Image (cartoon, grey):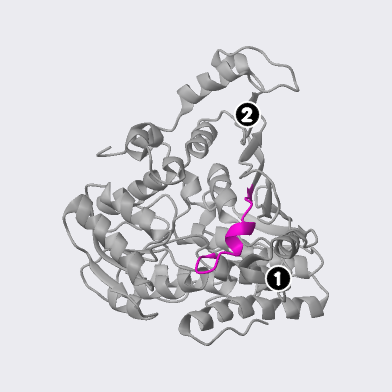
Amino acid sequence: MITPNLSRRGFLKASALTGVGASLVRLAGAGRAAEPAPASGASAESDLGSAPPRPEGQMPVHTLSTPPLERVRVAVIGLHRGLEHVRSCLGTEFAEVVGVCDLRDDRAQAAAGACVTQRGRQPSVYSGSESVWEKLVDRDDIDVVYIATPWAWHVPMCLRAMERGKHAFVEVAAAMTVEDCWKLVNTSERTRRHCVMLENCCYGENELLVLNMARQGVFGELTHAECGYIHDLREVLFELGSEGDWRRDYHRQLDGNLYPTHGLGPVAQYLGIGRGDQFRLLVSVSSGEGGLTRYRDLKQPNGGRHAGEKYVCGDMNTSVIRTELGRTIMLQHDVVNPRPYSRINALSGTGGTFFDYPARLALDAPARYGLEATGPHEWLGEKDLEKMRRRFTHPLWSRLAERAAGAGHGGMDYVMNWRHLDCLRRGATPDSVVYDAASWSCIVELSARSVAAGSMPVAIPDFTRGLWKAMTPLGIAEAPVRGA
């Protein structure tokens, strides 16, 4: 077990890690199929479809609307990744950054300087203390708090923000344990405040294209999807004074999928997870560990100071999820081997199949769309793929692409932030709510639990408590877009 110095940040990180670790020890000793751990407002259930009762005084938030806002007042905590969110807000005319916060004063001052340069307004700056963010969140002139901090801080910051009447926009993953996922759900329902996970990959050009095609029936009856996070982060994981300092710790503690949502979020939206279908169970298997150890031993980063570290997370984790409607999802995670970047981003149904990296599309009846016939083992040609792209490019992307040019991650950061902020401005329900944040994030713990139990099936909690059966499909493909 890691025993970092007991700063508040170290305590939070250790708590997040050991909370999962303790449950894995119990599972390994039990020698049986894993079940979701009891959580706040939940109890262990043996049958896969059960949902815990909703605590008295809470109401669902799947259609939560809030009063419209003339301008959306924003605070941002964590200004490494969060600086991109600041920039997106500065490029959104109805958003105003009123406060910025980081442990490091230089980052906070840089964000404040960007606000002055672009808008001529100096936001309040909070820095230099691990508790200073609490003062920012407690202000009464903020509508939404962006949380772009190390993972262990996500839940405490989200909870305080919602308790103080703010919406919480939180980076991925929203939580690292099932228990914390339930805390987010219960608090959002009780406070009537949104808790939205900032899954930018849901707003990539290709992801929005596939979502639009799926909604318009191009793929027929959806049956299977594949996704993942394949990203060589070996150098990043050993960078001192960066996210590598804390992300590497998880490789020492957990053997599972440590970062599921970039691939899973878009796929979940294609399949209508939480809106007509729901995750049911997961089986997860990990390869052996080798990539991170080999890189450390060969490169001896930071003067060899990491020589004594032992990594337990397998290089490749592969999880298979089965949904209530019998669809399947393959989800992978590998950040420690020399492979080109990929989120896989595949969707298959009775009418066609899409695979990304590079983008490829096969259709059962291409003539239906005025395309050339293909053989049973052929993808559409580049010209026909481009025709489909022109026909089905998502309207949100079409309207915002010019403004998003040059923004982070190929423009998806700006599109995501504009969309979420516009939903708050209009008082509309965001494209994803706390149930989505919990369902996508809980895979971290559940994959590790399945691996620890010999790859036995693990039930995935129904954070909607049965609402998925009646919730309408995601409306982003048809929703109006104002002010673009």
Which residue is labeled 2 in the image?
Answer: 360
Q: Secondary structure at mark 1?
A: loop
Q: Earlier in the sequence, mark 1 or mark 2?
A: 1
> Residue drawn at (64%, 23%), measured in percent from left and top?
363
Q: Are marks 1 and 2 in contact (CB under 8 Å)?
A: no
What kind of residue is marked 1? Glu
> Which residue of the protein is positioned furthest toward the left in this rendering?
120
Q: Nearer the viewer, mark 1 or mark 2?
A: 2
Residue 476 in the image, given as x and y percentages of width and height: 41, 41
Neighbour class for label 2 at 10 Å: few (<14), some, many (≥20)? some
Q: Quadrant of the C terminus?
A: top left
Q: Which residues are magenta?
A: 228-243
- Residue 323 image label: none
Looking at the rendered structure, the kind of residue marked 2 is Arg
Query: Can I make out residue 70 in this image?
Result: no
- Which residue is found at the position 38% from the left and 52% from the top? 430
Frontmost residue, 290 versus 19:
290
Q: What SS does tag 2 mark?
A: strand
Q: Residue furthest front?
A: 303
> At which x and y percent is residue 166?
31, 67
> Separation of disc 1 and disc 2 at Cα?
38 Å
Q: Image height check: is 481 above or below 102?
A: above
Please say if 39 is above or below 148: below
| For residue 418, side relative to residue 263 (left or right) | left
Residue at mark 1: 35
Q: Is residue 236 magenta?
A: yes
* Relative horizontal placement of residue 226, taking residue 180 as reference (left or right): right
Q: Is residue 221 magenta?
A: no
**Residue extending furthest toward the bottom:** 6
Residue lying at 70% horizontally and 49% vertically, measured from the top left:
338
Q: Residues within 10 Å of mark 1 (few under 14, many from 20)?
A: many
Query: Picture quarter containing residue 249?
Result: bottom right
